Image (cartoon, rainbow, N blue to C red):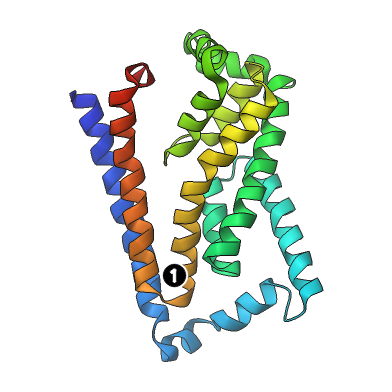
Amino acid sequence: MNGKTDEKLRGDIARVVLLAAFFFAIAFLLQRPDLRKILFDMDTLRSVLKGGEGTSGYLMSALVFTLAGGGLIALGFPRLWASAVGGIIYGAFMGTILSVMASLLGASVLYQAGKTLFSAVVERRVGDRLKVWQVRFRENAFWWVLYARFFPFSNSTVMSLLCGSCNVPFTAYLLGSLVGFVPLAVVFAAFGSGGAKGNLWQIGFATALLVLSIFSRRLMNRWFPSSRD
């Protein structure tokens, strides 16, 4: 393992520690009913954001979240934080589903932008590596989109624009994005849900999954050496 890889791994682990500490602190504070009342009424806030008790209000809230989240992601808002917000409002399960839908919507907009408006910008930003990615996408578009989506702390916006610029088949792009988005959407929706509910076990579960996703990259780099480039 070279020094650069070790440095990247240490940086990723440091981010995991900070994220876990942040959500553990929130969960610990919100475990106590007295502090929940002093800080804010989280239960009432979540109920309002979910559209109240009725089904129609809930569906409208989910639609607004998906459209607004997709728009923000298209503008560069991190999809992982959108998943955390989804978890806070809707819980881990529905937060995952809605944040993935929002991520796919935002990714689709960015794909079209990379294919049309920002093609030249992407070429300047990526530089000589553009040809490398063009070859990869021709060989197996689904795999390389999935590979790029699966790992935390990567630039999802640039990858979406790059895929559009390289004319990746949209079906392969969408399927690779869908499969790649789900694991980290689960992680961050669980972070958000656990923090809002004061559920320390949920935070621990999300932290374990995040660590697993980081170390899985080492295994994938071992199986697919060209992915290190």
- Please determine whether, in this image, residue 116 is positioned above or below residue 97: above
Compare residues 206 and 157 and report the one nearer the observer: 206
Q: What residue type is labelled 1?
A: Gly
Q: Mark 1 points at which residue?
A: 195
- Please determine whether, in this image, residue 12 is positioned above or below residue 220: below
The residue positioned 60% from the left and 49% from the top of the image is: 100
Compare residues 28 and 184 and report the one nearer the observer: 184
Q: Residues within 10 Å of mark 1 (few under 14, many from 20)?
A: many
Taking the view exactly as shown, the residue that stands out farthest to the bottom is: 34
The residue positioned 47% from the left and 76% from the top of the image is: 197
- Please determine whether, in this image, residue 59 is positioned above or below residue 107: below
The percent coordinates of residue 62 (x first, y second) are 71, 62
Quarter in which the N terminus is drawn: top left
The residue positioned 62% from the left and 18% from the top of the image is: 121
The percent coordinates of residue 193 (x first, y second) are 49, 68
The percent coordinates of residue 122 (x first, y second) are 60, 19
| Total numbered badges shown on the rendered structure | 1
